[in-house]
Amino acid sequence: MLRERGRVLLIAAALVTALAVAGCGQKDFKNDPRPPVPAEVSVKIAKDGVAVSPKEFGAGLVNFTIANLTTDPGTFAISGPVDADSDEIPPASAETLRVDMKTGSYEASVDGIRARPFSFTVGPERPSGQNDLLLP
């Protein structure tokens, strides 16, 4: 009886070891690079028109920081391959709009304020931020 019990324990230990070894197998994981660092783009809304700086940048995530320098509230709008609108921006204040931009030509305008629209271009996707230090 002791012999049978030892045999059962030995088989159970072998099974557990086999499962543990099988679970530790290395699979092929592709080391995907990090996405590009978000581009920081400034937008000025003034009575004479809308201005976007820089006026050319690469595709990917873009943080638009919009300053409404007028005395009227307005909504910043982007039209092109990707359309986006900000929340209403009160007079003399700022707002941030985060958009995943695609390559193409765009027009920036403001609803609620008579300001001349501004054209800008989004080029090919920016390079990966894989080897940039001190990024979140």
Image: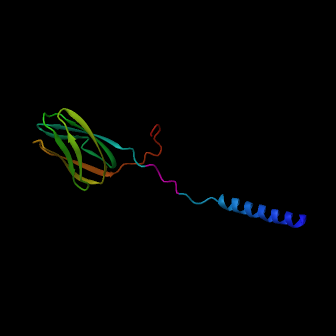
> Splitting the image into 4 quarters, where does residue 6 fall?
bottom right
How many marks do you count on the picture? 0
Residue, x 90% and y 64% (percent of image)? 2
x then y, percent, for residue 122? 27, 50
Establish if 101 lies above or below 136. below
Q: Nearer the viewer, residue 39 or 69?
A: 69
x then y, percent, for residue 90? 19, 36
x then y, percent, for residue 126? 36, 48
Establish if 54 lies above or below 32. above
Residue, x 52% and y 57% (percent of image)? 30
Single out the residue that lies furthest toward the front.
1
Single out the residue that lies furthest toward the left.
114
Q: Which residues are magenta?
A: 30-34
Q: Nearer the viewer, residue 25 or 23?
A: 23
Could you tell whether 128 is left or right of 66 in the image? right
Q: Nearer the viewer, residue 9 or 78?
A: 9
Residue, x 22% and y 33% (percent of image)? 93
